[in-house]
Amino acid sequence: MCEGVAVVVSGGSRKSVMEEVVLVVIKEGGVTIVNEDGEELEVSGFKEVSVDLVGHKVTIVTE
């Protein structure tokens, strides 16, 4: 499978916030990530979002 891990970087620290991520939705004002169980997490105030398809990682940098 191609699930990934979502990591939030804030103030220089990194925190894993969700595993088995299958969907990333980027909208004005926020990012919504969804895992394979359908659980959702919204992150607002992001500065950058990167998706590493080979490394199976979504990195969200907040302001």
Image (tube, grey):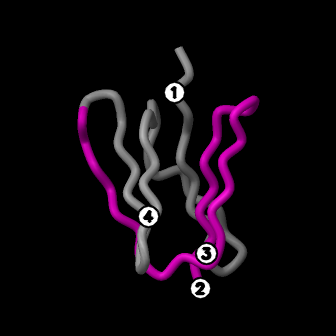
- 3D distance between C-alphas at marks 4 and 3: 15 Å
Q: Amino acid at mark 3?
A: Ser
Q: Secondary structure at mark 3?
A: strand
Q: How many marks?
A: 4
Please give the name of the residue rendered at 37% of the width and 58% of the height, measured from the top-left corner.
32
Q: Which residues are magenta?
A: 38-63
Mark 4 / mark 2, whichever is N-terminal: 4
Magenta segment's dominant SS is strand
Q: Dot 2 corresponds to which residue?
A: 63
The quadrant holding residue 41 is bottom left
Q: Secondary structure at mark 1?
A: loop
Q: Dot 1 corresponds to which residue?
A: 3
The quadrant holding residue 21 is top left
Looking at the image, residue 38 lies above or below residue 45: above
Q: Dot 3 corresponds to which residue?
A: 10
Q: Position of residue 40 (x, y in %)?
A: 28, 49
Estimate how packed mark 3 is, as few (under 14), some (14 to 19) or many (20 or more) residues with alpha carbons within 10 Å: few
Q: Which one is nearer the viewer's eye here, 2 or 11? A: 2
Q: Which one is nearer the viewer's eye here, 46 or 9? A: 46
Q: Position of residue 31 (x, y in %)?
A: 43, 64
Disc sitting over residue 31 in the figure: 4
Q: Amino acid at mark 2?
A: Glu
- 3D distance between C-alphas at marks 4 and 1: 17 Å
Please give the name of the residue rendered at 44% of the width and 33% of the height, measured from the top-left corner.
22
Q: Amino acid at mark 1?
A: Glu
